[in-house]
Image: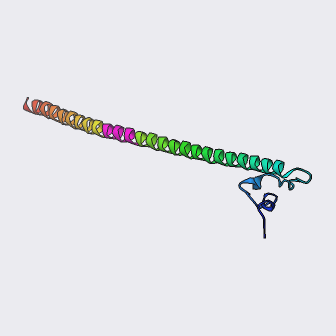
Amino acid sequence: GKSSSSSTTDPDANDHDHDRDAPSPPLDFSGLPAAVKHAFVSRLRSLESRVARREKHWAGVLREVHAAHAEETARARRACVAAVETKNAQIKTFREKLNAIAIAAHEQRLLESGVAEAVRSGE
């Protein structure tokens, strides 16, 4: 079977997100003491672990930024909709008042023309 030392040179071992990188040739530890190989592999795994943690952290930060941006956009959209609805209500009220004034003015002209007609016919 596989021993723990052969898994370090296995290209599929610890294959995190390195698909985007060019495949590196297997490391050649021949001629080096086992302690040096162990220290190197240990340091390499530590660095890989730190990189993975950083990638996870920044992915989380990115998600939070996107969520905050989406919430801010939604809040701004709701504020705009509310402002438009308020203005539409104001315009409706203004139109109703304007219509009432126009009707009153028209009735006043009718009354005045009727009074003038009555005065003329009464002469």
Which of these two is toward me, 73 or 19? 19
Residue 92 drawn at (x, y percent): 30, 40
* Extreme residue toward the left, this view: 122
Residue in view at x 91 percent, y 54 percent: 30
Residue in view at x 29 percent, y 35 percent: 94
Which of these two is toward me, 74 or 83? 74
Q: Quadrant of residue 11?
A: bottom right
Q: Quadrant of residue 113?
A: top left
Report the quarter where the C terminus lies.
Answer: top left
* Extreme residue toward the bottom, this view: 1
Seen in the picture, residue 10 relative to 117 is either above or below; the reply is below
Which residues make up the magenta segment? 81-91
Left or right of 72 in this view: 119: left
Seen in the picture, residue 13 relative to 47 is either above or below; the reply is below
Residue 86 is covered by the magenta coloring: yes
Residue in view at x 62 percent, y 44 percent: 58
Residue 116 drawn at (x, y percent): 14, 30
Residue 2 drawn at (x, y percent): 78, 67
Magenta-drawn stretch, dominant element (helix, strand or loop): helix
Report the quarter where the N terminus lies.
Answer: bottom right
| Colouring | rainbow
Residue 102 drawn at (x, y percent): 25, 35
Left or right of 43 in this view: 83: left
Which of these two is toward me, 17 or 100? 17
Seen in the picture, residue 120 relative to 79 is either above or below; the reply is above
Residue 31 is covered by the magenta coloring: no
* Number of marks in picture: 0
